[in-house]
Image (tube, helix red, strand yellow):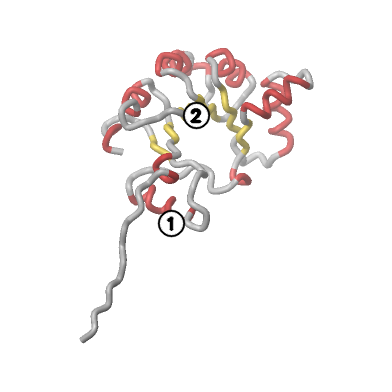
Amino acid sequence: MDAVAGLDVRIADTRKTTPGLRALERYAVRVGGGHNHRFNLSDGVLIKDNHLVAARACGLTIAQVIQQARRAVPHTMRIEIEVTTVEEAREALAGGADALLLDNMSVEEMRQVVAEAPTRRGALLEASGGVTLENVRAIAEAGVDIISVGSITHSAPALDMSLELEKG
């Protein structure tokens, strides 16, 4: 959080947590000033790259995939789509996605998507993949709304504690 201080961006965790410790790890993220992504798969729709591969094999466009998802879920549920190129981002925005997960894009590609943001109709832009302490500020400065970082939960160091009893 310190690395992006002063910038209008949220740092979010992912669902990648230690089995049995998800609630605690996610609480720690909030205490540290971060935000939580979906708690489980039913909290939102995330159309991933494999979904798009399967959809394209059936002759569907990104817009059609988004439309099908929207028809299948309550009106209150956000539909996010993972994109890996600027062109896919354009298609997803034109197709009415509520949020885009900019997966493993370069900072320059993210800037390009953000530059086209006036056409996004309120869609959130989330950067993910390859985020490190060294590049997180540059990613934030590209203008994305959210940066999701799995390592703040799945790679957090463990606290070494023990209780030693002494006789007497």
Q: CA distance from mark 1 to mark 2?
A: 27 Å
Residue type, numbered disc 1? Leu
Residue at 61% of width from left, 44% of height from top? 41
Q: Nearer the viewer, residue 84 or 160?
A: 160
Tell me: 91 left or right of 64. left
Residue type, numbered disc 2? Leu
Residue holding disc 2: 124
Which quadrant of the rendered structure holds the N terminus?
A: top left
* Image coordinates for residue 60, horizontal then vertical, percent: 75, 20
The residue sitting at the right extreme is 58
Q: Is residue 32 above or below residue 105?
A: below
Label 2: element kind: strand
Residue holding disc 1: 24
| Quadrant of residue 115 within the rendered picture | top left
* Image coordinates for residue 123, horizontal then vertical, percent: 52, 27
| Quadrant of residue 166 within the rendered picture | bottom left
Q: Is residue 12 above or below residue 101?
A: below
Label 1: element kind: helix
Residue at 57% of width from left, 15% of height from top? 90
Tell me: 150 left or right of 167. right
The residue sitting at the left extreme is 168
First of labels 1, 2 by sequence position: 1
Residue at 48% of width from left, 18% of height from top? 117
Task: Give the foreground label among 1 and 2.
Answer: 1
* Image coordinates for residue 113, horizontal then vertical, percent: 48, 16
* Image coordinates for residue 148, horizontal then vertical, percent: 44, 35
Residue at 30% of width from left, 71% of height from top? 163
Tell me: 86 left or right of 147. right
Q: Nearer the viewer, residue 65 or 70?
A: 65
